[in-house]
Amino acid sequence: MDLSFLSSIFLSILNGLPLTLNLWVLSLIGGGCLALLLNLLRRSRVGNAIAGTYVFLFRGTPLLVQIFMIYYGLASFGFIRQSVLWPFLREPYWCGLLALILNDAAYTSEILRGGLRAVPNGAVEAGRVAGMSGFTILRRITLPIAIRQALPAYSNEVISMLKATALVSTITLMDMTGIARAAISETWRAVEILLCAAVIYLAISMLVTRLGIWAERRLSPWQFGRTTP
């Protein structure tokens, strides 16, 4: 194995790390906000139907198909090409980011929904008795408990979205996977190149896993306490 080649290709792939992190963080932020909105919609019958249909569509279809539909499909509609959104939707970056946000929102909304269902009714009733408004109850009681309950599952979703960013390389974005694919087409040394990319993704995933465990310990310290024999 050529160590000089590995070191050079490793540094080359790292050039795509800022774009990967950019897409990853922004998709999580956007998906989280949209997921919260979807759960708020579920309070009404019509909103619940809309949110349920959205989740069914984006969880039931591959992310790669969604990326292609946004990047290639939207351009086939004349009214979109003539709208104010076209300067953004014709760019692969915005199309990839939009697809990641919409996909993440579907999964995160279900994770948050499970966390919301785990909130004890007694805690909400106690907030009402204390004179809290609906928004205050949501901010100080419902969301903190729901996030604590949903954190283990959400940690997995965060890692899944990191790996999902690799799919944007299919629409010409030069993230880490895009650089790796270009290097493979030039050198035909797929094993070494993909190994370097895998090591970087694995390192980030391990860091996220450790941060998730740390957050769980901070939010639920009683679950990690030692029990006396």
Image (tube, rainbow, N blue to C red):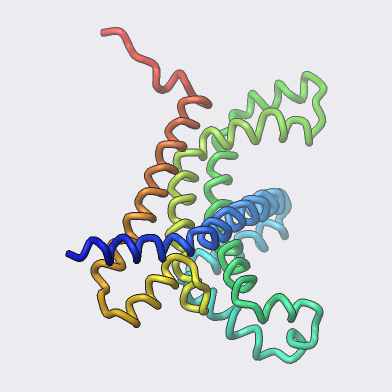
Q: Which of the image's four quarters has the C terminus?
A: top left
Above or below — where is 112 with respect to 169? above
Tell me if residue 67 can be seen. Answer: yes
Instruction: Find the residue positioned furthest to the top.
Output: 228
- Residue 217 is left or right of residue 134, and the answer is left
Vertical comparison of 72 with 137: above or below: below
Residue situated in front as seen by the camera: 17 or 227? 17
Residue at (74, 91) in percent of width and height:
78
Q: Residue furthest front?
A: 4
Residue 197, image quadrant: bottom left
Q: Is residue 203 left or right of residue 116?
A: left
Q: Is residue 163 left or right of residue 129?
A: left
Residue toward you, 86 or 125? 86
Using the rendered image of the protein, determine whether residue 61 is visible from the camera's viewpoint.
no
Relative image position of residue 168 (x, y in whole percent): 50, 71
Residue 47, by quadrant, is bottom right
Quadrant where the image shows the N terminus: bottom left
Picture coordinates of residue 32, whole percent (x, y): 62, 51
Residue at the spot 58% in from the left edge and 85% down from the top edge: 72
Above or below: residue 32 compared with residue 124: below
Where is residue 137 drawn, in percent x and y?
A: 74, 30
Q: Against 70, is 143 above or below?
A: above
Q: Residue at x 41, y 41 (%)?
A: 209
Residue 141: image x %, image y %? 67, 28
> Quick one: 26 or 133, which is closer to the camera?
26
Identity of the residue drawn at 46% across and 26% down:
217
Residue closest to the far left: 1
